[in-house]
Image (cartoon, rainbow, N blue to C red):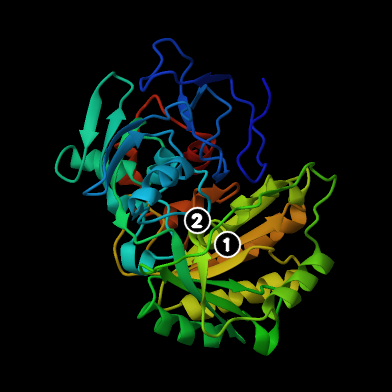
Amino acid sequence: MKPLHSWNRLPRITPDTVQALSAPSLPDQATLPFCIYGNGRSYGDVCLSDQGTLLHTRTLDRFIHFDRHQGILRCQSGVTLEEILQLIVPHGWFLPSTPGTRYATVGGCLANDVHGKNHHEAGSFGHHVTAFELIKSDGEALVCSPDDNHEYFYATIGGLGLTGLISWVEIQLMSIQNSWMWVEAQRFGNLDEFWYLNEKAEQNWPYTVAWIDCLARNNARGRGILLTGQHAASQPQLPRYRELPLTVPVTPPFSLINNLSLRSFNNVYYRQPLKAQGSLCHYSPYFYPLDAIQNWNRIYGHKGFYQYQCVLPPAVAPEATSELLKAIAASGQGSFLAVLKTFGQKPSRGLLSFPRPGATLALDFPNRGERTLKLFETLDAIVMAAEGALYPAKDARMPAELFRAGYPDWEKFCNFVDPAFSSHFWRRMTA
């Protein structure tokens, strides 16, 4: 059996057995426990296991019903967001909350309660789920909604695939006029400027997110570019869009992301010309810029990379974010992808949902072994002191202590974990 990994290529874990589901049901004869694996677009080990049977759900790829007038879609859990968008956008509908890749499955989006650039207005993915079917290991099939089997509804949203097999999901879509976005970009010189500009932007724009230069120091710490957007209004004529996909054909023996390449990229990207008046942009490069580069995860080499994403409470977010960036710059281990945004006040539905009021910082680091893990110990201490949390869907090494502190409902959630389901991540957190 070959080792499997998530998108960041670590950890590499060899399952006992792998089985692709041919129908939305659990196999009668299988080695337990079950672990759910969709399209492998999460980071880390929430969808990996070295015990029992790994269930591939990507084969559950059928659409069940699409109400083109009300914008209600029901599909099996292995359908990807890309397949959904191909169906719904021509009919004037869009995903109300979407992560940074369109290749995630809808079941994975529910199980990790993913979020997007519009959380301050729309909340997370779970806020738009109207119902789903959950198949338990005892054979019971539960249709869950806010009104029916509601305890399992709230436990399964963000429940990391541990409450049972999600067979289908129903979501309420959002109406759009076309497939284009109106976007603006604004440069800011440091973190203080970001907090000011972002607060103003969230009052007028449904989508906001910032790229930051995590190697900048002193008065320039946290400099970056704030990107705001909204779905374009109906227009008589729109440009044609054709995506020209690129690919990283091979995995280099070492990471192409290093201090020299990163500093050069950050300087060029920060100083790029910006259109003050804004511009039209197709939804694909706006929401999913890296999806245009096939196998972009290969640029980090055979050792893979870690993603570190935290959320920090509003009262301490400015100071704690500054401390995180200070520690990263001092370590010399910058992040190629450094994204900063704020969550809105809408409480998440799930017991283990990551989104909550505050600021979230997402970073990618090449795997440099002990040096990288030592940096994470420093970052963990800052997050813990701020009473923040890390994102399980993007974790490959979170200490159990930090998980339990960041998710105080984890013991309540344990009551809804199906005894036949587990994962490498869950065993790390509960050992």
The residue lying furthest to the top in this view is: 29
Residue at point 46% right, 80% down? 198
Q: Which residue is mark 2?
A: 402
Q: Which numbered dot is residue 88?
A: none
Question: Do the residues under discs 1 and 2 have CB atoms within 8 angstroms?
Answer: yes
The residue lying furthest to the front in this view is: 236
Q: Which numbered dot is residue 380?
A: 1
> Would residue 386 be visible to someone looking at this image?
no
In the depicted view, which residue is nearer to us: 369 or 81? 81
Q: Secondary structure at mark 1?
A: helix
**Percent of width and height locating residue 265:** 75, 70
Instruction: Name above or below for residue 300 compared with residue 26.
Output: below
Which quadrant does the N terminus fall into? top right
In the depicted view, which residue is nearer to us: 330 or 355? 355
Give the Cα separation between the discs numbered 1 and 2. Answer: 8 Å
In the depicted view, which residue is nearer to us: 244 or 171? 244
Report the amino acid beneath label 2: Leu
**Percent of width and height locating residue 364:** 65, 58
Residue at point 59% right, 54% down? 242
Q: Quadrant of residue 363?
A: bottom right
**Percent of width and height locating residue 150:** 19, 42
**Percent of width and height locating residue 41:** 55, 43
Q: Quadrant of residue 16?
A: top right
Q: Quadrant of residue 328?
A: bottom right
Residue at point 48% right, 39% down? 426
> Would residue 393 be visible to someone looking at this image?
yes
Instruction: Name above or below for residue 173 compared with residue 265.
Output: above
Instruction: Name above or below for residue 308 compared with residue 345.
Output: above
Of the two numbered discs 1 and 2 on the same chain, state the one appearing first in sequence: 1
Residue neighbourhood size for the residue with mark 2, other residues' Cα within 10 Å, grouped as few (<14), some (14–19), many (≥20): some
Report the amino acid beneath label 1: Asp
